């Protein structure tokens, strides 16, 4: 691949929604695109910014309650653009706070309804208990998904989405069912950080593969990273995952 | 205080202070004999049978209590405040054993109190964990409090940074005379708005140093504008070779320091400010600076050991801002670097924080050894930052042995989380004199 092939990655609200190492997800996408010969172009979008014309992949993170308040109005403002991108199969990964706001609504403990952008058919209710700890979840498509949750909102899925995975350790979306995360077309919502993508490269490669397919109609190769690396990333990932499954909640 | 009067008359109160002191000391002996080493256990016993023991004892101190809290720098700053006050001729009680919970304070008192329940001290300086400080200040109202910062840390315990900021606010509101705030931390600075009767002073940084100490907010968006900054009583103006230049109430003072690292130099500004507020006009400034220059690092905080004839620095890292400061405070060249990351309860279980630290500064010379329970999380982190490393060995004892053997005669630096540091110090005892914890 001699000619540069840019892939435009948009980080949604990195200034206010970045609390749990969500930058790690951007970095992993960036490197894994480079290792395959694509040129990642990272865009940051904060409230009032100009929405970039070219967007191939969107990621977003979690925030404080105050951070969510700051971006909510702006998110609704760009809602139409996001809907159009989701409908045309643009891959997106929304973690924690932005996962909640990608749903229809968030009902706070005080009974106030915060409107979400409604790309995912989910609703969230604030509770007094925080669900905190290591999570292991099982997905047919991505295998075992490992991460760490820390949220007081509990999310319930409607019929328009599939669960991303089923929890085998921890709570995931809520304390009632075993669902973790949600999936609609190529949009993934999840409560898991850690960051999510470093230890779950199957999800990273799914996002990249969808972006590359949409933009260049190309299929990505499984082999990555320049050959000859002393410690191959696959081996480090495998060992980091093995540790994560053994750790206490 | 309502909490005290509402407490039912307990077994311990009936016994009086003598009974509680004796009981606590017995518990201390028992726990030592059993070799459990838990410094807080005797405190727990006394807390259960005599819940007002702490308040009764501390209320008798002529100059009251100073509380030090915040995410980063509590231990070193508390040690500085203690030694500055001692340099001014005061007898100081402190909870030096590292038990920064209420029962740890009780345990420390039991070690020093006379049988009649009186402490032979003029003033107490207490390092308190944010969450425990909230309970403490409702029982014992401090005369002064020093609030350092609110950083991303222990989110698995506290949930949100804003929650932690609320805890510091509660401490300030329960302080009777004066509060000292970090001007450079927006969440700490804002606490001033909810204080009405207390004197408020600030410590801060010069404009040119602000970019050297980025907050978590700045990390993603650059430092905020400084026009709303109030005047600070103590300002760290510049970092000098082995020390710093401060402005104290408009007067410029330069001093060398025994403690390492830019963050400890900023902690010195905090300590100066709270001591100046506490002593007011009676402060002896030359003596203050002299004491400051002699303060040695607290346990594991920028400690420098000599191992096999070369220097070995232990740098405690427990959250993104602390790790970033640790990396920027020491030159990365000419030194063998090891990183040890555990995820035990005291370290925090969530590994997300490693991804909020940039490791580019280590790229030039690479990392010799990665260790700890989460060694492979750390290795993956460096891999994605294109920082080379030689070896990964999760077992800390093996890793330390290999690290020292593979880099003979080279100055060494180990960045480590809290429980990794505890283990490493134990293993280092085989090579060198390590001060007992």
Image (tube, rainbow, N blue to C red):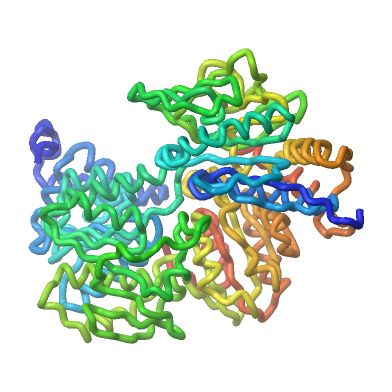
Occupied quadrant, residue B427:
bottom right
B52 is higher (above) or lower (below) than A126:
below
Q: Is residue B132 visible?
A: yes
Horizontal and vertical percent for residue B421? Answer: 52, 60
**Depth check: A53 or B143 in front?**
A53
- At x 47%, y 36%, the residue is A72
B398 is higher (above) or lower (below) than B244:
above
Horizontal and vertical percent for residue B263? Answer: 43, 69
**Depth check: A56 or B47 in front?**
A56
Q: Quadrant of the C terminus of chain B?
A: bottom left
- At x 26%, y 52%, the residue is B191
Q: Image check: B408 left or right of B332?
A: right
Q: Image check: B78 left or right of B284?
A: right
Q: Is residue B257 visible?
A: no
Horizontal and vertical percent for residue B222? Answer: 49, 61
Q: Quadrant of the N terminus of chain B?
A: top left
């Amino acid at each position: 691949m001699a000619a540069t092939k840019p892939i435009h990655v948009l980080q949604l609200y990195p200034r206010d929604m970045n609390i749990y190492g969500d930058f790690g997800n951007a970095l992993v996408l960036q490197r894994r695109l480079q290792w395959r010969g694509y040129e990642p172009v990272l865009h940051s979008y904060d409230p009032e910014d100009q929405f970039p014309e070219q967007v191939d992949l969107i990621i977003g993170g979690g925030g404080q309650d105050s951070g969510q308040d700051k971006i909510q109005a702006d998110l609704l403002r760009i809602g139409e653009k996001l809907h159009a991108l989701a409908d045309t199969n643009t891959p997106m990964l929304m973690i924690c706070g932005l996962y909640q706001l990608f749903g229809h609504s968030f009902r706070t403990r005080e009974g106030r309804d915060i409107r979400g952008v409604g790309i995912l058919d989910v609703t969230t209710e604030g509770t007094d208990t925080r669900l905190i700890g290591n999570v292991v979840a099982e997905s047919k498509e991505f295998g075992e998904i490992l991460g760490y949750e820390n949220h007081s909102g509990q999310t319930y899925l409607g019929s328009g989405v599939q669960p991303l995975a089923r929890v085998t350790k921890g709570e995931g979306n809520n304390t009632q069912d075993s669902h973790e995360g949600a999936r609609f077309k190529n949009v993934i919502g999840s409560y898991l950080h850690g960051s999510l993508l470093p230890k779950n490269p199957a999800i990273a490669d799914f996002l990249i593969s969808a972006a590359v397919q949409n933009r260049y109609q190309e299929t990505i190769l499984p082999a990555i990273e320049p050959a000859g690396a002393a410690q191959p990333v696959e081996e480090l990932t495998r060992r980091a995952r093995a540790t994560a499954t053994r750790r206490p909640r | 205080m309502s909490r005290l009067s509402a407490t039912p008359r307990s077994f311990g109160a009936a016994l009086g202070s003598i009974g509680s002191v004796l009981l606590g000391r017995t518990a201390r002996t028992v726990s030592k004999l059993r070799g459990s080493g838990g410094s807080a256990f005797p405190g727990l016993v006394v807390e259960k049978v005599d819940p007002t023991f702490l308040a009764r004892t501390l209320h008798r101190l002529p100059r009251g209590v100073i509380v030090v809290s915040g995410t980063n720098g509590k231990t070193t700053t508390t040690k500085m405040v203690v030694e500055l006050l001692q340099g001014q001729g005061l007898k100081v009680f402190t909870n030096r054993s590292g038990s920064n919970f209420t029962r740890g304070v009780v345990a420390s008192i039991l070690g020093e109190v006379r049988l009649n329940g009186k402490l032979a001290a003029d003033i107490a300086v207490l390092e308190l964990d944010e969450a425990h400080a909230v309970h403490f200040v409702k029982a014992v109202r401090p005369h002064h409090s020093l609030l350092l910062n609110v950083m991303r840390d222990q989110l698995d315990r506290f949930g949100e940074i804003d929650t932690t900021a609320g805890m510091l606010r509660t401490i300030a509101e329960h302080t009777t005379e004066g509060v000292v705030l970090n001007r450079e931390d927006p969440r700490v600075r804002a606490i001033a708005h909810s204080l009405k009767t207390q004197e408020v002073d600030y410590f801060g940084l010069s404009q040119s140093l602000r970019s050297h100490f980025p907050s978590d907010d700045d990390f993603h968006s650059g430092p905020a504008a400084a026009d709303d900054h109030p005047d600070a009583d103590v300002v760290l103006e510049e970092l000098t070779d082995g020390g710093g230049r401060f402005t104290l109430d408009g007067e410029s003072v330069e001093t060398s320091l025994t403690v390492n690292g830019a963050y400890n130099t900023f902690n010195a500004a905090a300590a100066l400010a709270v001591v100046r507020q506490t002593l007011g006009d009676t402060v002896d400034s030359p003596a203050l600076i002299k004491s400051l220059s002699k303060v040695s690092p607290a346990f594991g905080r920028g400690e420098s050991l000599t191992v096999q004839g070369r220097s070995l620095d232990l740098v405690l890292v427990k959250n993104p801002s602390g790790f970033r400061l640790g990396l920027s405070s020491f030159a990365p060249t000419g030194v063998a670097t090891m990183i040890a990351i555990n995820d035990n309860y005291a370290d925090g279980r969530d590994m997300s924080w490693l991804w909020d630290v940039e490791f580019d500064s280590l790229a030039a010379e690479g990392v010799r050894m990665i260790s700890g329970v989460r060694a492979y999380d750390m290795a993956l982190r460096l891999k994605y930052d294109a920082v080379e490393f030689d070896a990964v060995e999760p077992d800390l004892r093996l890793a330390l042995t290999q690290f020292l053997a593979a880099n003979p005669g080279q100055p060494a630096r180990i960045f480590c989380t809290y429980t990794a540091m505890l283990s490493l110090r134990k293993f280092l005892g085989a090579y060198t004199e390590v001060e007992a914890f």
